[in-house]
Amino acid sequence: MPPKKKITLIDTQKYELCLYANSNKENRAHYVNWVKQKWGVEVDKTTITQILQTREKRLSTKIIQPNQKRHKPVTYPELEIAPKEFVLNYQHQAILSDAILIEKAKLITEGL
């Protein structure tokens, strides 16, 4: 028997599941079937448990990126902010090619 493929729901799906679970107190197997009917994906009961354990946080937090699946912190925020600021400052003054952006990223990396 082949191993099960890991399924990760997007944030809007997790939010909808939490809303549904708040209004329908059911068991995990019911939620697994509901997800399968609603989105056509088969998730494990443990996935349901993990999502519902953070139900209050999910329902109280605004969804910024609805299609995002995982939330990983940025290891080096400077490497994310500096190139963005460079592009925003120079996008109307010059044509920014891939080569220019790569070279600027190298300079920023060396500066850190």
Image (tube, rainbow, N blue to C red):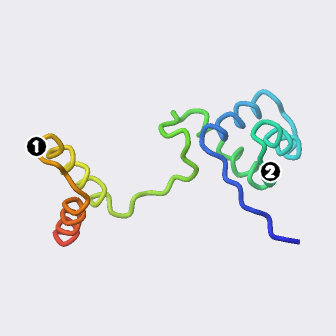
Residue depicted at 87% across the width and 37% down the height: 26
Near-viewer residue (6 or 77): 6
Residue 73 screen position, x and y as percent: 44, 57
Near-viewer residue (90 or 66): 90
Task: Assign a secondary structure to mark 1.
Answer: loop
Residue depicted at 80% across the width and 50% down the height: 42
From the viewer's perspective, is 102 left or right of 68? Answer: left
Name the residue furthest top. Answer: 23
Q: Label 1: which residue?
A: 93
Residue depicted at 77% across the width and 47% down the height: 41
Q: Label 2: which residue?
A: 42
Residue 71 screen position, x and y as percent: 51, 52
From the viewer's perspective, is the residue at label 1 or at label 2 nearer? 1
Residue depicted at 17% across the width and 49% down the height: 95
Looking at the rendered structure, the kind of residue marked 1 is Gln
Image height of 67 relative to 73, above or below: above
Looking at the rendered structure, the kind of residue marked 2 is Glu
Disc 1 to disc 2, how far (Cα)? 50 Å
Task: Assign a secondary structure to mark 2.
Answer: loop
The label shown at residue 45 is none
